[in-house]
Amino acid sequence: MARKNVFDLAPEPTELTPASAQPKLGRPLLGLERSIRPASPVGAISQSLESINSRAQRADEIEKQLAAGRVIIELDPALVDGSFVVDRLSVEAEVNASLAAQIREHGQQVPILVRPHPEREGRYQVAYGHRRLAAAKELGRPVRAVVRDLTDEQLVVSQGQENNSRTDLSFIERSFFGARLEDRGFPRDIIMASLGVDKAALSRMIALTRRLPPELIEAIGSAPSFGRLRWAELADLLEDEGKRSKALKLIREQDFLTEKSDDRFQAVYNQLKQAAAKTERMAAAAQSWVPSDKSVSVVARYRPKGISLEITKTEAKPFADWITGNLDSLYEAYRQSKQEN
């Protein structure tokens, strides 16, 4: 009896203690119950304590290996939730279909990494392997996974390093992921470890991301063909409020999200470049006037919805005041000149 208590096993069932009422041995790391079923009342006397001891030891060993992350198990995909910080902005449908086809034909070769969900008992949270999880759900089969107890910091470092090792995320995905981690209060050293970059590179990535509207980044998606320089150029174009409004209007159009991510980036970029070119043409068409004494300078700038006069030099304010005070006579003189012409 003393040895039974060591393993916290239930007493052998008797006619007064039905088997259905016996306590079970749980596997807390997995959030599953793996009961060691006691022998039936008829065979209880013949079952040796050595056999019970052996099975309990094997279960404990599996539990220890799972805690160390050395065992691959199969989980119901419905029990697995995504990471609390999403790294991928978008994945093309054909890429998902190709991965699902590979797993259907050859099986899931690489397990995903999950942790017991910190807030939802009996569920799990992905560190990496979101696409493999989605493919398993689509195929209606268990997902092969390694279960580890991970802190939030360990999860995001594992998540980032796995993607870095496969050079799988685009520039904007990595930058946006870093900015999201910072928004959640993670220190820069953890973010650097996750992305595999130094302090200066991380600062540039996050600074660039802050110049871009989050809704525009999410609408464009991963844009794998475009790196830092093109995104920086896009950010420069968006400094103008008018161009920014045009870009945000474009991404809300119904057909925008039907295009591939690279094409979405190009569409926004082209629109902003065209607007910039139009502004430059209008600026080039500006007319200027300077009197012989050069005491004042007047520049007429053509804009999409009108013309602005810019008056500078030493006589700028008194001249502007005089023009404002004589607008009635000036406009009448203008109308008279039109009639004469």
Image (tube, rainbow, N blue to C red):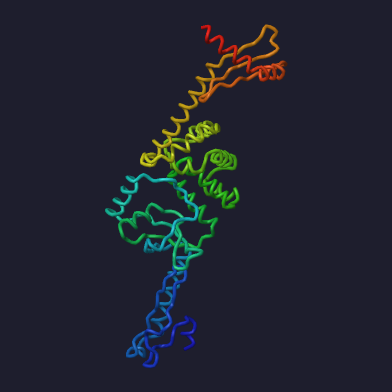
| Left or right of 95, for residue 165 | right
Where 200 sits versus 2, above or below? above
Q: Position of residue 331 (x, y in %)?
A: 59, 16
Work out whether residue 176 or residue 302 is closer to the camera in this orientation and state it.
Answer: 302
Q: Position of residue 197 (x, y in %)?
A: 54, 43
Work out whether residue 73 or residue 306 is closer to the camera in this orientation and state it.
Answer: 306
The part of the image, by quadrant, that contains residue 12 is bottom left
Where 125 sits versus 302, above or below? below
Q: Position of residue 293 (x, y in %)?
A: 70, 8
Work out whether residue 57 or residue 144 is closer to the camera in this orientation and state it.
Answer: 144
Q: Position of residue 288 (x, y in %)?
A: 60, 13
Q: Residue at x 42, y 39 (%)?
A: 224
Q: Residue at x 37, y 88 (%)?
A: 18
Q: Residue at x 38, y 56 (%)?
A: 133
Q: How many marks?
A: 0
The part of the image, by quadrant, that contains residue 147 is bottom left
Work out whether residue 273 or residue 171 is closer to the camera in this orientation and state it.
Answer: 273
Residue situated furthest left in the rendering: 105
